[in-house]
Image: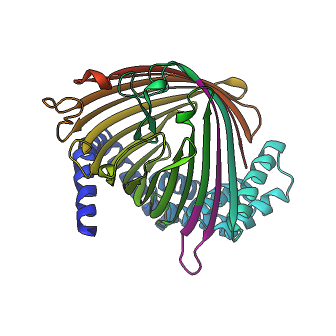
Amino acid sequence: MVRDIAFKFLLLAGFVTLPLVAFSQNLDTDDNQSETNELTQLFEEISRNPDNLNNNYRYAKLAEKMGKYYESIAAYERMLIQSPSLDRVKLDLALLYFKVGSMDEAKKLFLEVKSKNPPAQVAQNINKFLAQIDGKNRKHSFGANVTLGYGSDSNPSASPSSGSVDVFGVGIPVDDATSGQSDDQKFAHVRLTHSTQVPYVKNTVWSNEASFYKAVQDNASSLNTTVYALKTGVSQSNQNGRLRYGAHLNCSNVNLAEHEYLNTYGYDVFMDYIMSRKAKLRLSHSQDYRKFQNSPTVTTYEDRNGRASEDKLSLTAMVTPKDIVNASLSLRREHAGVDYYTNRSRSFGLNYTRLLENGFYMTGGATFKRTKYKDVDSFVNPFVVREDNERTWTVGLGKNITSNLTCGFVYQDKKIESNIQNYEYTNERITATLSWRY
């Protein structure tokens, strides 16, 4: 089983990242070679004259830019041995120690600079890092996020003819009375987190997460949804912090119209690669085992029981300090007791965030998804195997009211085209949210 998972990772990574890597190499080869040559030349000059502060500083900055953090640290340390009063060098070295996870060394240097009454802005930035260091040095860290919202849908069911609603990627059949009717909903989402350093294992964090989601429709009570979820796992990063990887176990319980509907348990594994200060690549694989329950309002039959797996590649890039782009490609497979519930889907998503003045931000995104089922559903159409094409557009505007409180408004337009008319539908949604985090 482990070998199969590894093969899936290699297949996905090779299929998707090879063109990206080749493209990146074509652009960066000349620059990288030039920087390597410059670093070698500086090293030779420092070997001949180790007391030259200018060459040591240039070497430290260039080594840091190239991701050679410990070589950069050594250059800064040489400078401080010769001139212990260089506060600018102490700040640069403290930031590097913070980056590689040497919090005690970073804190010591920050406090040394702060004790000399630096400018107000410098002191403010030092205090922010000291607060983060104190948080990282705590044996246990806790966090919370609470979101309250109100939404309005032109068609809350997933299809005007068949009648079903989408909850976290799971299609839930509903009675015909809710089909094709607009409705509003109130919802709340609470997320609690806990993390701690694993004893005696360097750069390893054990994290836990519990979440609760509740949505209540104004009219279509059969769509009222409650979700409980738990997640736990470990993650680790290498010494220079550019590679991070981990695994989690998870379980969830979905209730529909106050009746138990779906239980899942599974796992996920991931790997993050920091390509540069402005770009991060993530590769992940997840697998869930699903068991459906019949209820007075919903009949799903046991033949929907099975497993779902997903491979995903995502790239996050800060194009400018105010422009952030996220692109993702995913492959999902759902296996069920009968072939007309078994399907395979591919999706591509692109999201853009623009940071505006006075704490405002703007978001926009598009998602395209294609799903193909394995066999015909004789109850719907005995001659055609179902294929769906889905596209979703979103645009939003939000504001950071304080460092902990955020409000937002999002408009979403979704359309699914299918070769079986029963499964075609469109829906427009407007959502307002207020979120608090700790």
Query: What is the x, y in percent for residue 223?
Result: 53, 34
Any part of residue 68 in sight: yes
Q: Furthest residue to the front?
A: 296
Q: Nearer the viewer, residue 321 or 229?
A: 229
Q: Quadrant of residue 247?
A: bottom left
- Inspect the magenta stretch and tell me whether residue 108 lies in it: no
**Most frequent secondary structure within the magenta stretch:** strand
- Name above or below for residue 253 compared with residue 162: below
- Residue under the point 74% across and 42% down: 404
Residue at 27%, 63% (x, y): give it.
6
Dividing the picture into quadrants, the one containing residue 40 is bottom left
Q: Which residues are magenta?
A: 184-208
Q: Residue at x 54, y 69 (%)?
A: 203
Q: Nearer the viewer, residue 46 or 141?
A: 141
Q: Is residue 15 toward the left or the right of residue 156 in the image?
A: left
Q: Is residue 348 above or below residue 59?
A: above
